[in-house]
Amino acid sequence: MNRYIEQLLEDFKESARRVPEPSHRIKSFNRSDEGEMEDFAYVETYIYGEKKQLSEIVSIPKENFPPRGKLNSEQVENLLNGILELLEAYFFFPDFPENLPKAIQYQTIVKHWNDKHIFVGASKTHIEYCDGNQEECPFPAHCTTCNDLERESQENKKKKKLEEPLISLLPNKSEIENFIKQQRQQKIKDIIQEQKKQNTIESIYNYCDRWCEECRFRNNCLLSLMEEEFYEKNIFSDKSENMLEAFDDMLNASVQMLAEMGIDNATIISPENASEDIQLDLKSHPLFKETQKYMKLLNAWLHPKTKKALCSIGSEFESNTMEYLKPLTLLGHYSVLVHTKTNRALNSLLNSNISEACIFDMNATARLILDCTTKSKKNLVSILNAEKNSNDELIPLLGSLEKTEKLIESNFPKARTFIRPGLDE
């Protein structure tokens, strides 16, 4: 037996001399840095490794190992030391409990010699035989791992039990989101209050044409000042969902401020608050139909014109193109504004029980519509003069605007002479 064991130990040493070189990926790393190699070996194992039987990796068949019953203690120790040196050469390290008898270590290794592993060629690959299940522990009366895991589990349970009352005191996700929302609404209210102290003109933003870039009242407009402040204090962000949340918070903050002043938002006449009957009357009203018709006619004429102009940007005619686009853009902007503001004014007109504030809003809105139709006609005439061949398309648009103005004046007789704060003073 001794001669056979000596030959087997020689086979171990010969196998250890034939350990394959690590892959080209591992060669590029600093193999003397154990931390670096251990981290990379983990990645290497799960991405590139191929599982093979340990007997195949080291080229020592399981059948070569003599049974434990035919070995004395010295022979077991010699074989075990040779096996551990062989495995270490291949970067494999069996994990055993401290003071586990060498005979049991030998039997365990041989028993699992055909188990599959991945040869990494660097760092340490630990071979574990205990999975922490006390009932199936391979080392009863010797293993501390199972006891350590059980003790750790019990300690974690105690710790969790102690932490539960503390966790219940912490705010949940919904409470945190509500707190952030309340903070933002309060910040919005503070900005509104602060800007109202400036030299602003009351409600000027409700009755202007909303072409802010050329407005001479930007420093007197609460809405304009608020927008600048909101962006400066990062209440609005680039993300659309955050923008919508901010607008929603701004609306809620405004409603709260109205309530603090004793104004019920439900009493304000608007398309959203109008009854179903008023909505039906509104949509059948000649003025509503006319502004809707004008918007459709304009879009049918405007779309191909704008598309053609945009396609020529970047060419030698770019400066002329940009100059040509401005009146087209204004026409589109005013057509939408005329229709939506007509909707607002008619809501008040068709309501039999409205307040003085709503009457003021109705006449101021009607005056704004006339202002927009006047500017629209001016832009159409300038295009008509420049494009003599567009008469057949533009004259119906001018006619629709003329009809809209007549309907405004007949339904809102005070509109033409109504003085909007700041704008007509």
Image (cartoon, helix red, strand yellow):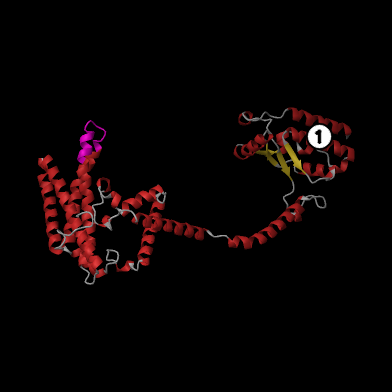
Q: Is residue 49 visible?
A: no
Residue 60 lies, in percent from the top left, at 75, 34
Q: Secondary structure at mark 1?
A: helix
Residue at position x 16%, y 53% in the image: 373
- Residue 207 left/right relative to 383: right
In this view, the residue in front, 410 or 102, is: 410
For the C terminus, the image quarter is: bottom left
Residue 46 lies, in percent from the top left, at 62, 40
Q: Residue furthest bottom?
A: 353
* Bounds of the magenta segment: 311-324
Residue 324 lies, in percent from the top left, at 20, 40
Residue under numbered circle 1: 82
Residue at position x 76%, y 39% in the image: 62
Quarter occupied by residue 360: bottom left
For the N terminus, the image quarter is: top right
Quarter occupied by residue 277: bottom left
- Residue 311 left/right relative to 187: left
Q: Amino acid at mark 1?
A: Gly
Quarter occupied by residue 74: top right
In this view, the residue in front, 237 or 85, is: 237
How dense is the environment of label 1, judged by Cα within 10 Å: few (below 14), some, or many (20 and up)? Answer: some
In this view, the residue in front, 360 or 245, is: 360
How many tags in the picture? 1
Residue at position x 11%, y 53% in the image: 399
Q: Is residue 406 visible?
A: yes
Magenta includes 252? no
Residue 181 lies, in percent from the top left, at 45, 58
Q: Is residue 30 above or below residue 45?
A: above
Q: Is residue 263 above or below residue 191?
A: below
Q: Is residue 325 above or below residue 240?
A: above
